[in-house]
């Protein structure tokens, strides 16, 4: 880095773009195909989805920061193990905090908090971004990607909870009179496979709005 | 009978992909041709079959509360279960490294056909998921844990081979442009998941 560039603003346009591009064009789930593994099973209700989203944001941001700060001293051959250790430590912290402060949600998420370790978003961002960039941009990149992931999770959870059990955040939304007219909850929405179809619809919507994203 | 039950359950009812979406990343990325997906699927069966029993031993003799009592009575109250994530991932990473070295030494042809997929298994969620489910479901002995590991691997294998066969076929179909590639694969996986749900409640 040259001396003149040293005083780059904390929120320069470039850094802002790091934060916002994962929300749309470079969304980790719909475009980069990262982190689908542990995501989809926690979206039956909104609350676990929000908690999961926040946990991932924390782990990606802090993990990106740590890896980026150490990037020059990690030997290339063992970098995967170093990355895994950093992730595992952060995930243990998140898991213990969840158990201490919201035990119910932690029970609901069951093994999926642990599976943040093998969430491809983390390894993907470490390899693609944090290993080659300074700590502050990496931190923003981590927050951005975590947010992009969290947003998809929450959207899917809203659809599933609204149509699957007629409520949002546990409060009844669909009035009782609807049920009297013969409306009933769509039991299929609770089932895991429907999540994939909802995500596919999000991808369909996003790609038909933005023709550049279409695969040939 | 218990073994058979666990085996069938882990293949069909609690299928890693269709019931829990574990290992989706490599599932979506590698399932373009049948040949590579057979290779990856076999490697996953192999690694799951090794890591789940090893992690079972780790869990029983090191991690659960009171597990350390074999060292001496004064360790009987130690509870190391908060370390399980880091222990499991260390076992998985070193096991994949070991498997890679063994395969390279004894069967170079298999090694070259698996190529990059072997090291990638370390970050496949299905592997860590297998160990964590093993811990959560509290299997009685190492035999049950091994059967569970191999069964989940076979379930994953079946899923990836099936979807790659379908993807080879649909490459000739006329799919709406925005759905091409990722979108249609998601929908097919969803439909296959619904089909797999018919196994629910199936008991031996």
Image: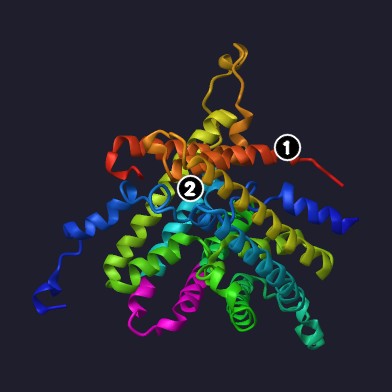
At 23% from the left and 56% from the top, the residue drawn is A16
- Tell me if label 2 and label 1 are in contact, CB under 8 Å: no
Q: Does the stretch in magenta take in B189?
A: no
Nearer the observer: mark 2 or 1; the answer is 1
Quick one: which residue is furthest to the right in this view? Answer: B1
**Residue B58 location in percent, x, y?**
72, 76
At 30% from the left and 61% from the top, the residue drawn is A140
Q: Chain of mark 1?
A: B
Name the quadrant containing residue A131. Answer: bottom left
Number of marks in the rendered image = 2
Name the quadrant containing residue B146. Answer: bottom right
Q: Considering the numbered disc 1 on the image, is that residue within a helix, a strand or a loop?
A: helix
The residue indicated by pointer 1 is B198
**Residue A6 location in percent, x, y?**
14, 74
Quick one: which residue is furthest to the top in this view? Answer: A181
At 57% from the left and 65% from the top, the residue drawn is A96
**Residue B137 location in percent, x, y?**
75, 59
Q: Is residue A7 left or right of residue B65?
A: left
**Marks 2 and 1 on same chain:** no
What main secondary structure does the magenta stretch of the protein show?
helix
Give the extent of the magenta segment.
Answer: A65-90
Q: Does the stretch in magenta take in A70?
A: yes
Q: Is residue B50 left or right of residue A80?
A: right
Name the quadrant containing residue B202. Answer: top right
Residue toward you, A81 or B36: B36
Q: Which mark is residue A50?
A: 2
């Amino acid at each position: 880095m040259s001396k003149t560039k040293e005083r780059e603003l904390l929120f320069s346009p470039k850094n802002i773009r790091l934060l916002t591009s994962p929300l749309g064009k470079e969304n980790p789930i719909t475009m980069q195909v990262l982190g689908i593994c542990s995501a989809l099973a926690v979206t039956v209700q909104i609350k676990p989805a929000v908690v999961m989203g926040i946990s991932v944001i924390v782990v990606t941001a802090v993990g990106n920061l740590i890896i980026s700060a150490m990037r020059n001293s990690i030997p290339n051959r063992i970098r995967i193990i170093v990355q895994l250790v950093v992730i595992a430590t952060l995930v243990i912290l998140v898991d213990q905090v969840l158990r201490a402060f919201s035990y119910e949600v932690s029970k609901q998420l069951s093994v999926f908090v642990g599976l943040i370790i093998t969430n491809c978003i983390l390894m993907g961002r470490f390899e693609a971004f944090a290993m080659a960039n300074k700590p502050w941009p990496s931190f923003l990149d981590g927050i951005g990607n975590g947010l992009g992931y969290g947003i998809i999770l929450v959207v899917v959870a809203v659809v599933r909870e609204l149509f699957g059990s007629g409520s949002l955040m546990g409060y009844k939304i669909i009035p009782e009179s609807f049920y009297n007219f013969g409306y009933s909850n769509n039991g299929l929405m609770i089932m895991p496979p429907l999540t994939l179809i909802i995500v596919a619809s999000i991808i369909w919507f996003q790609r038909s709005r933005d023709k550049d994203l279409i695969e040939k | 009978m218990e073994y058979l039950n666990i085996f069938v359950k882990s293949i069909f009812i609690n299928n890693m992909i269709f019931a829990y979406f574990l290992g989706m990343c490599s599932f979506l990325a590698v399932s373009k041709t049948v040949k590579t997906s057979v290779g990856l699927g076999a490697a996953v069966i192999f690694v799951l079959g090794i890591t789940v029993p090893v992690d079972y031993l780790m869990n029983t003799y090191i991690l659960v509360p009171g597990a350390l009592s074999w060292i001496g009575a004064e360790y009987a109250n130690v509870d190391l279960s908060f370390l399980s994530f880091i222990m499991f991932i260390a076992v998985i990473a070193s096991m994949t490294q070991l498997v890679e070295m063994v395969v390279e030494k004894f069967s170079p042809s298999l090694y070259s056909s698996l190529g990059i997929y072997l090291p990638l298994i370390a970050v496949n969620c299905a592997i860590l998921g297998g160990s964590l489910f093993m811990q959560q479901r509290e299997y009685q002995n190492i035999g049950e844990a091994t059967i569970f590991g191999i069964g989940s691997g076979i379930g994953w294998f079946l899923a990836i081979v099936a979807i790659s066969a379908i993807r080879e076929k649909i490459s000739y179909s006329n799919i709406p442009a925005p759905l091409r590639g990722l979108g249609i694969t998601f929908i097919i996986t969803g439909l296959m998941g619904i089909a797999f749900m018919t196994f629910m409640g199936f008991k031996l």
